[in-house]
Amino acid sequence: MLEASAESSWIEIDGSALRANLAAFRGVLGQGDTNHGERKLGIVLKANAYGHGLLETLTVVHPLVDIIHLISPRDALLVRKYEESRQWPRRRLLVIGATSPEEFVQLAEEGVEVTLGDDNAVAAVAALQARGLRAQAHVHVETGLSREGFFPSEMRTKLAFLNAPECPFEVKGVLSHFANTEDVTEQQYALQQLKQFDAGVTSLSALLGKNSADFERHIAASAATLVLPQSQCDFVRVGISLYGLWPSTETRLSAKIVLPNLPKLQPVLSWRCRSQIVKKLAAGAYVGYGCTFRCERETRIAVLPIGYYDGYPRILSGRAHVLVNGHRAPVLGRVMMNHIVVDVTGVTGDEGQVVATLLGSDSGETVSAEMVAGWAQTIHYEIVTRIGSHLRRIVIDQ
Ligand SMILES: *Cc1c(COP(=O)(O)O)cnc(C)c1O
């Protein structure tokens, strides 16, 4: 199990955990709101599937989800190519990130849905018309994150082009994004945003001479899906929790109160590394750049060929541990560009090669993304998304 790759360091993706998390979210959709059996399950595969590997993750989840959201147009085109090469049916794909006029054209050609969230949308009209292309679009409403989107009050002017004859955009949906659902246990700000969202839908309906029910509405990411069921709307966009990670402790606490059945989320990713060298150092020896660690006693170390280049944060110098043979092995001295050194005294009896777990479980001990994030003074989102895309992802499926 701990010997899955030819490379010295690799990422294991647990396919059954991914499927279990999807099933858990199917269960969460509509809990406490039985009128809504039709709610779709959308997931977010941005940022190399939160570091889990875009195509590796796609292979497992593609048949099981309704809509796939991506930030980058390039990723969406890659997914289309992959579907084609595998002769899979096309899933609904929606790009929610910045899109240039040229990219609007490429996405429309591939039947990828687009987001109108900034002034590039109007700039894309001519380019699409020149090619005789039409695009299915979702309008992003600015409800208080102060990122992309149109204020309800500016829609009449900024989105008037949608009413022009031969406008290449067919507005299919309306979306927004919450600013403050995971950092709190009360949802005042989110409720305010929901009001603004409604105002946006109303304003857009008036502009286009439609009913609000004519649009698919979506605003909930993982946290809101879990703690604010009334925000689930027509579909959700589950990111971090698809990968088995709770958005925050606050979200988990709130969900315990809100949901009749708390879903069990299973972390999907493990990061392993085979040692390059195991050796004994004499008492008094120094380890690593800056000589920041000095052995108090004879110490057996393992040199692991991964470092901050691979996404193991340098701030973990002297603060973290990895797992070796189910035991904690502290990181000694500084994290280097391509190496770390860990203390395996008492963890292994000789100088034979060991396999270290940097993230994940080994024999009942776990180093979670949350723990690493705590040591690194950041959030687990950053820890997983920054794991180098050059490391091989292996789907382990049993
Ligand atoms: C990243 C993102 C999501 C997913 O958020 P999670 O907290 O990871 O579930 C949903 N919608 C938008 C617009 C996003 O940028």
Image (cartoon, rainbow, N blue to C red):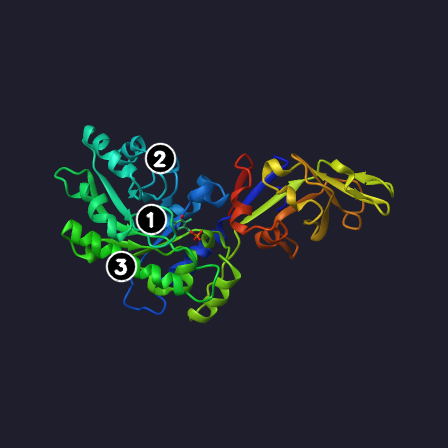
Q: Could you say where residue 274 lies in the image, as x and y percent from the top left?
A: 67, 39
Disc 1 marks a residue whose amino acid type is: Ile
Q: Tell me the CA gap for discs 3 and 1.
A: 22 Å
What residue is shown at x 45% (from left), y 71% (from top)? 257
Q: Is mark 2 within 8 Å of ligand 1?
A: no
In the image, is the residue at mark 3 within 8 Å of ligand 1 by its beta carbon? no
User: Mark 3, mark 2: which one is toward the viewer?
Assistant: 3
Say the numbered circle drawn on residue 77.
Answer: 2
In this view, the residue farthest toward the left is 165
Can you say whether 246 is above or below 384 in the image?
A: below
In the picture provided, is 347 more to the left or to the right than 177?
right
Disc 2 is placed on an element classified as helix
Counting residues from the start of the chain, the first of labels 3 and 2 encountered is 2
Q: Is residue 379 left or right of residue 39?
A: right
The image quarter containing residue 339 is top right
Tag 3 residue: 198
Of label 3 and label 1, which has the lower sequence position?
1
Can you identify the residue that label 1 sits on? 67
What is the three-letter code of the residue carrying label 3? Asp
Q: Give me the residue at 68% from left, 43% from top.
A: 355
Q: Residue at x 13, y 52 (%)?
A: 209
